[in-house]
Amino acid sequence: MKYFIAIIKPFKLDDVRKALTEIGVEGLTASEVRGFGRQRGQTEIYRGTEYSISFVPKLKIELAVPDDLEEKVLEAFKNSANTGQIGDGKIFVFDLKNATRIRTGETGDNALS
């Protein structure tokens, strides 16, 4: 099993969710987060005054999938979250030792579907 954490621009959530659903991903968790990367934040103008924002709003998506979906999930993230602009985000992939569905006690791949 693989565990994905992806940091994306918030307005790309619907595109990412649709792409993941089309390849068979049955669930994910999305959280609003804030952070910065190479750009070190951004500058915005509000009512004629310029403000520096150190932490940029992002979404963190987390999901677990069977090993056979790893490449498809990675491609779905890359294609659907890409805007071609700085700050598109990152995708992290981890090996997942186990998963357990609390309600039924199912483990492994069976707990993911």
Image (spheres, rainbow, N blue to C red):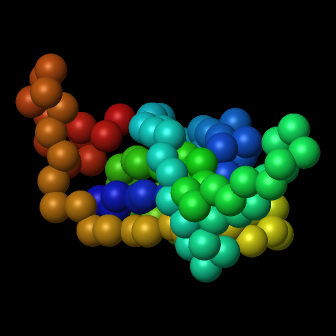
| 96 left or right of 106 in image | right
> Looking at the image, which residue sits at the far right?
48
- Residue that protrudes farthest toward the front in the picture: 49
Q: Is residue 73 visible?
A: no
Work out which residue is located at the far top of the displayed protein and give it. Answer: 103
Asked whether residue 42 is in view, the answer is yes
Residue visible at 24% across and 61% down in the picture:
96
> Which residue is at the far left?
105
Closer to the camera in the image, 35 or 82: 35
Q: Residue at x 34, y 61 (%)?
A: 2
Residue 52 spot, x, y in % from top left = 68, 59
**28 lies above or below 104:** below
Indicate the position of residue 104 as horizontal and vertical percent values: 13, 23
Q: What residue appears at the point 36 percent right and 50 percent down from the top-left corner?
A: 64
Total number of numbered discs in the rendering: 0
Above or below: residue 63 compared with residue 27: below
Q: If the image is split into quadrants, where does the N terminus sit?
A: bottom left
Q: Quadrant of the C terminus?
A: top left
Q: Where 52 sits versus 100, above or below? A: below
| Residue 14: image location, x then y, percent | 70, 36
| Figure quadrant of residue 15 | top right
The residue lying at 82 percent from left, 69 percent from top is 84
Report whether 29 appears left or right of 52. left
Judged left or right of residue 89, residue 96 is left
